[in-house]
Amino acid sequence: MLGVFEILYGYTGMKLELKKFGTLLTSRQLGREAYLAIQPVLRETSDDEAIEIGFEGVVALSPSWADEFLTPLQEQFKGRVMMNESNNSSVKATLELLESVKQ
């Protein structure tokens, strides 16, 4: 199946599965540590490469963890971060909260 960025822009991107950082993503400190830990990999991305965020396997995502990981990621890769949909209510609520704070 083709990804959204592949369909729209003709290229694929990097997929980050957040479950690699754990299933309970709940503290601000751990979110910041995860963001810093992924930097060497992110430095290898090209200027036209999308960053796809996967939430499969995540049991809980707190606003504080997400703010320390997702917010700077979105600032670093303006317009190139795509969040996969999730049926997890914790993920949905956190993403909605972060989006409302940005506005």
Image (cartoon, rainbow, N blue to C red):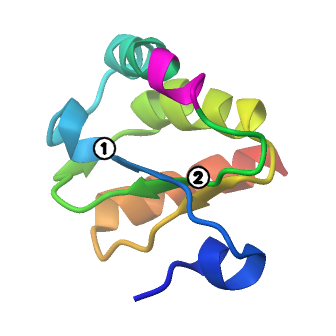
Which of these two is toward me, 34 or 68?
34
Image height of 96 relative to 23, above or below: below
The residue type indicated by label 2 comes to Leu
Does the stretch in magenta take in 9?
no
Q: Is residue 25 above or below residue 2?
A: above
Q: Residues within 10 Å of mark 1 (few under 14, many from 20)?
A: some
User: Which structural element holds mark 2?
Assistant: helix
Spot occupied by residue 22 in the image (x, y as percentages of width and height)? 16, 35
- Asked if residue 22 lies left or right of residue 79, the reply is left
Q: Which of the pair 53/9 is nearer the observer?
A: 9
**Mark 2 sits on what residue?**
97
Seen at 72% across and 53% down, the residue is: 80
Residue shown at the point (46%, 38%) measured from the top left: 63
Q: What is the span of residues highlighted in magenta in the rendered image? A: 40-44
On the image, numbered disc 1 is attached to which residue? 18
- The amino acid at mark 1 is Leu
Dominant secondary structure of the magenta stretch? helix
Distance CA(mark 2)–CA(mark 1): 18 Å
Q: Is residue 7 above or below residue 103?
A: below
Count of marks overlaid on the render: 2
Q: Are marks 2 and 1 in contact (CB under 8 Å)?
A: no
Quadrant where the image shows the N terminus: bottom left
**Residue shown at the point (15%, 57%) measured from the top left:** 57
- Residue 65 in sight here: yes
Across and down, in percent, residue 13 comes to 55, 56
**Where residue 83 appears, x then y in whole percent?**
53, 61
> Residue 14 location, x and y as percent?
49, 50
Please tell me the numbered disc located at residue 79: none
